[in-house]
């Protein structure tokens, strides 16, 4: 996409601080970071979200993501990260070029992310598997 800032970064037409680059992916430091070493990994080609990405490109993206977290772990001693990707407007995606955030976490960094949990939904799981037509229930002790 011609005017997409992430596409421009992938084509080296916009300023960025590149951590890694492969055939299909690149990783950059985020221009508005939430923590030190906050990084985004994204495809060079324009894909709006994960539903659009071909599996071979996704493999390269995930390999790049793993390379970066390993690099940060080995070189910087970062041993806690959140990997975040929002896909679709309802999922709070606000830039419509697929990307993954690597958010390093530090003790007491004030960046808590909490979800509301619904344990009562477990009662629907048998019907949910039937709706998909895949999967199976494994009846084993909970440990």
Image (cartoon, grey):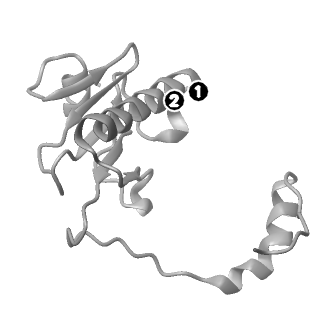
Q: Nearer the viewer, residue 14 or 96?
A: 14
Q: Nearer the viewer, residue 37 or 61?
A: 37
Please name the residue shown 39% across and 13% down the image.
Answer: 23
Which residue is farthest top? 23
Please name the residue shown 51% across and 29% down the image.
Answer: 58
Give the number of callouts: 2
**Does residue 47 appear in this view?**
no
Please name the residue shown 25% across and 34% down the image.
Answer: 75
Q: Quadrant of the C terminus?
A: bottom right
Question: Where 71 sits versus 117, above or below?
Answer: above
Which residue is farthest bottom? 120
Q: Position of residue 132 (x, y in %)?
A: 81, 55
Q: Nearer the viewer, residue 95 or 39?
A: 39
Quadrant in the rendering for residue 96 = top left
Q: Position of residue 37 (x, y in %)?
A: 19, 45
Q: Residues within 10 Å of mark 1 (few under 14, many from 20)?
A: few
Q: Secondary structure at mark 1?
A: helix
**Does residue 142 appear in this view?**
yes
Q: Position of residue 91 (x, y in %)?
A: 43, 60
Distance in Å between CA atoms under marks 1 and 2: 5 Å
Quadrant in the rendering for residue 20 = top left
Question: Where 46 sits versus 35, above or below?
Answer: above
Instruction: Name the residue tied to disc 2.
Output: 58
Instruction: Name the residue tied to disc 1.
Output: 55
Q: Position of residue 48 (x, y in %)?
A: 41, 38
Question: Where 38 sits versus 113, above or below?
Answer: above
Quadrant in the rendering for residue 64 = top left
Q: Secondary structure at mark 2?
A: helix
- Tag 1–tag 2 contact (CB < 8 Å): yes
Left or right: 126 in relation to 16 = right
Q: Nearer the viewer, residue 22 or 47?
A: 22
């Amino acid at each position: 996409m011609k005017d997409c800032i992430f596409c421009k970064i992938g084509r080296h037409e916009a300023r960025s601080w590149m951590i890694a680059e492969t055939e299909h992916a690149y990783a950059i430091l985020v221009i508005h970071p939430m923590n030190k070493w906050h990084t985004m990994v994204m495809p060079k080609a324009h894909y709006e979200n994960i539903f659009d990405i071909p599996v071979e490109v996704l493999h390269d993206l995930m390999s790049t993501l793993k390379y970066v977290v390993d690099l940060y772990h080995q070189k910087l001693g970062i041993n806690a990260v959140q990997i975040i990707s929002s896909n679709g407007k309802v999922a709070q995606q606000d830039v419509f070029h697929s990307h993954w955030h690597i958010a390093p976490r530090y003790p007491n960094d004030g960046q808590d992310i909490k979800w509301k949990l619904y344990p009562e939904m477990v009662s629907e799981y048998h019907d949910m598997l039937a709706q998909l037509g895949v999967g199976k229930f494994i009846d084993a002790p909970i440990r």
